[in-house]
Image (cartoon, rainbow, N blue to C red):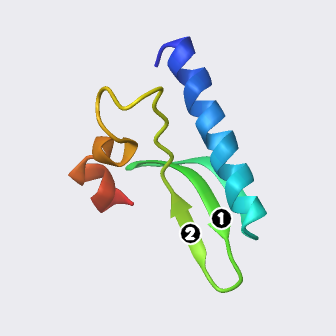
Amino acid sequence: MPHRRQRLGRLGEDLAARYLANLGYHVRARNVRYRSGEVDLIVQGADSLVFVEVRTRRGRAYGAPEESLTARKRLRL
């Protein structure tokens, strides 16, 4: 991943973590790697554990972030 994309991705993850923390979630882990892939954030709520895939885009020229999530990635999550 080019350096510029890495910075953008990290910014998106930081913003997502801050947003979820403000909603009362506790960030348990970031960028957890498994044999089958990676999870950007793992957060814990009052009665739930949530696995978060962060998709950061500079604009909508190539579609919405949720549209960039492939079926394969959804299955892994």
Most distant residue in the left direction: 71
64 up-or-down from 58: above or below: below
Upstream in sequence: badge 2 or badge 1: 1
Answer yes or no: do the residues labelled 2 and 1 have beta carbons within 8 Å? yes
**Could you tell me residue 61's position as x and y percent?**
32, 26
Question: Which element carries disc 1, helix, strand or loop?
Answer: strand
Q: How many marks?
A: 2
Most distant residue in the front direction: 60
Query: Mark 2 Cα within 10 Å, few/some/many (few <14, many 20+)?
Result: some
68 up-or-down from 29: above or below: above
Tell whether 56 sits left or right of 61. right
**Mark 2 lies on residue:** 50
Tell whether 1 sits left or right of 27. left
Most distant residue in the bottom direction: 47
Residue 34 vs residue 58, the one in the foreground: 58
> Which amino acid type corresponds to the residue marked 2 in the rendered image?
Val
Query: Mark 1 Cα within 10 Å, few/some/many (few <14, many 20+)?
Result: many
Tell whether 24 sits left or right of 50. right
**Mark 1 lies on residue:** 43
Q: Residue 65 falls in which quadrant of the image?
A: top left
Point 63% across, 32% down: residue: 10
Point 61% across, 60% down: residue: 42
**Could you tell me residue 44's position as x and y percent?**
68, 71
Measure the C-alpha gap from mark 2 to mark 1: 5 Å
Point 32% across, 51% down: residue: 73
From the image, which quarter does the C terminus lie in? bottom left
54 up-or-down from 58: above or below: below
